[in-house]
Amino acid sequence: MRCAVIVLAAAIAAAQAQESHQHGSYGTVAFTNSCAAPVQPAFARGMALLHSFEFGPAIDAFSEAGRGDPSCGIAVWGIALAQWANPFSPANRSAPQLQAGRESARRAAGVGGKTDRERAYIAAVAALYDRFESVDQRTRIAAYRDAMARLAAAYPDDPEAKAFYALALAAAADPADKTYADLLKAGAMVEALWTAQPDHPGFAHYIIHSYDVPALAPKAIDAARRYAKIAPGAPHALHMPSHTFTRLGYWQDSIDTNILSAAAARKSGQVYEELHASDYEVYAYLQTGQDAKARAIMEDAPRIAAGANTTAGAAPPVAGGYAMAAIPARYALERGAWAEAAQLPLRGGVPWIDAITLFARGLGGARAREFNTGAKTVPGELQLRIDALNKAGETYWAEQVAIQKLGVSAWVALAEQRPADALALMREAADREDRTEKAAISPGPIAPARELLAEMLLQMNRPADALAEYRRTIAKEPNRFRGLAGAAAAAAQAGDAAAARAYQRQLVAICVRGDTPGRPELEAARRAAATSRNP
């Protein structure tokens, strides 16, 4: 009997030892757990996939581990966490998604963890789903964040606990907090972990997310350069570097990595991830004057969207809907094709996605050569979406749509010869946009409000004031085509020829692969650059 006890103890100790597995194209993950030894490879594969937001394949791997060891409650925890999906999606989860996650969390608690630590993980994930019928999503997210903080404090030697706490902290951060206290704290935590485990996919991934704001983006550049190499099999790992590249205006880097991401997503049946990568890719093409390539993706997007999404990835369904509305809106507005923007078809559906098309239609109609009076109805249409979003508790998106309403109202006022009202409305839009941050679902605003303010001032023959606003938006959104082209025009009209030439040279440099002939602003910059080289 004593011998059997010793053998059993040795087996449990071996199973509880920290398992580390290299999963080829998904990186290396170590997560101490008490599941049976034969299921450790499946469990570790699930962890590697989970850290790259490959939620469907992660659920499959955790399910495999659970079938191999029905007492492996921590594998059911992994399923419950994966069912929450992308923690940076600001939209409210659907009732079916929440019900499925709660059932998994309850099943994990029923199976139980074999250690206090595992039981703490299982208890923490339950907070995401607890009483979702009556407790709002933001409160539940905060409760999960706080539970992970307690877990990380209780097990200071557990790098996974710290990583998941950092992820929860970054995901719950207030987009209006311009001290970025939670984002900086989260980023510092995973930076320290990444030093010790450089091939861990989650650490590089969460650094990028933690620093995904203009003021912090330079801190993520090393992670952005490495993440796709750590987990090249994950479509999201191939896409995520473009979040940093976009913040820094590294457009060709963004294009290159999103080409790879879209191809990987297509191969794995992730339609929404392919559309999400395509939105970022189109945004980068438009900033570099590669309009023909942007148009090709826009024309191909309906075919992509018609496909069946067979694998749950990082991008939720709303990311696909967002891309389908954002891509044509960007294509029209970035090129100044106002009449084209005014005619964009409204798809109908999610209010904050509808608002993208309405914003483009209103802005285009107000700025077209002949004022399209239909633009006057757009602020009212946007207000209906704001009301619906507030009623649904979607406060983040309600504010974003409110900013869009102000922008359209401003340009309608200008078209109606009310310049004072127009400037007041546009300044309010710019100030409110400065007080928040863009969601991870988007590479940037459909049209930055402060850039629109600069364009309005330039149109009102106030070039010096316009240049000041252009410089502010360029500092936040570097290397944007319209920002640089507008700044060059404003500087020239203000009599600052040197500044105008500098902005034109910068525009030519970022558009080195731009269409020939390109947009009028690019052709003017090219002529100016050629003249300066050959006086």
Image (tube, rainbow, N blue to C red):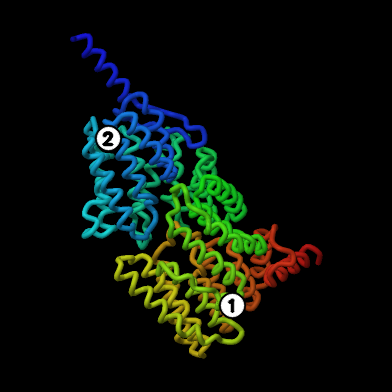
The secondary structure type at the circle numbered 1 is helix
User: Which numbered dot is residue 73?
Assistant: 2
Q: Which one is in front, 201 or 354?
A: 354
Does residue 329 appear in this view? yes
Does residue 148 show up?
A: no
Identified by mark 1, the residue type is Trp
Picture quadrant where residue 6 is located: top left
- Rendered-image quadrant of the C terminus: bottom right
Instruction: Determine the CA span between mark 1 and mark 2.
Output: 57 Å
Residue at 31 percent across and 70 percent down: it is: 390
In the rendered view, tell whether residue 449 sits above or below residue 37.
below
- Disc assigned to residue 449: none
Would residue 299 be found to the left or right of residue 62 on screen? right
- The amino acid on which the numbered mark 2 sits, given as a three-letter code, is Gly
Q: Residue under circle 1?
A: 338
Where does the image place residue 173, in percent across and percent down from the top left?
34, 55
Which image quarter: residue 163?
A: top left
The earlier-in-sequence mark between 1 and 2 is 2
What residue is drawn where x is 67% and y is 66%?
504
Q: Vertically, is 334 above or below 420?
A: above
> In the rendered structure, are the residues bearing label 1 and label 2 in contact, judged by CB atoms less than 8 Å apart?
no
